[in-house]
Image (cartoon, rainbow, N blue to C red):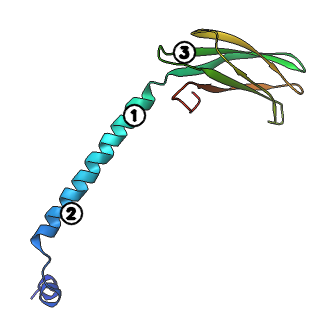
Amino acid sequence: MTSQDLLTERYGAPAPWRRRSLLAAVAVVAAVSLAWLAWTTLVHANPSVRSDIVGFDVVDDHTTTAVVDVRVGADATDVQCLVRAYAADKVVVGERVFTPTGDGRTEVSVRTERLATAVENVGCTADGQSRPR
């Protein structure tokens, strides 16, 4: 007698429908998960607005200019972008929220507390797009 036979004799054999129902439940959960993943990927793959920093220039101790390339979709409304200026010790010394003038490059002047050494484009948001891009 094998160990499997001993276990079956002692505890009984599992019902044959349990394995099929477990496989069906796993298939349903996997299908729902894949559908959600596909939907999420499609929705977030094409944001209404996106932006990249082209460059920046430190004008003086209290002014920095940044050139930001903003791409605005046709359905985007209430678009706002944010740039931050950092000092050498990585402290934020200035930031500016601006509305882009249209699709393309926008030059933004950022007032700083002291000399900035870096400028970061945090990103742009629009109605329905709360995460900056």
Q: Look at 44% across and 24% down and name the residue there.
A: 46
Secondary element under disc 3, as helix, strand or loop, is strand
Badge 1 is on which residue?
41
User: Horizontal and vertical percent for residue 58?
Assistant: 82, 17
Q: Amino acid at mark 1?
A: Thr
Nearer-N-terminus badge (2/1):
2
Q: Is residue 5 above or below residue 87?
A: below
Describe the element under mark 2 as helix, strand or loop: helix
Displayed quadrant of residue 103: top right
Whole-percent x, y for residue 74 in the image: 47, 13
Please name the residue that numbered disc 3 is placed on.
Answer: 71
How many other residues sit within 10 Å of disc 2, few (<14), some (14-19) or many (≥20)?
few
Label 1 element class: helix
Q: Is residue 121 above or below residue 54?
A: below
Q: Earlier in the sequence, mark 2 or mark 3?
A: 2
Which amino acid lies under the numbered mark 2 shown in the image of this protein? Leu
Q: Where's residue 34, x and y in %? A: 31, 43
Residue depicted at x 30% and y 41%: 35
Q: Are marks 1 and 3 in contact (CB under 8 Å)?
A: no
Which amino acid is tagged 3? Answer: Arg
Query: Could you give the CA–CA distance between mark 2 and mark 3, rounded to whole angstroms?
Result: 48 Å
Say above or below: 112 vs 2.
above
The crowd level at tag 3 (other Cα within 10 Å; few <14, some 14-19, many 20+) is some
The residues tagged by marks 1 and 3 sit, at their Cα atoms, a distance apart of 20 Å
Q: Which mark is residue 22?
A: 2
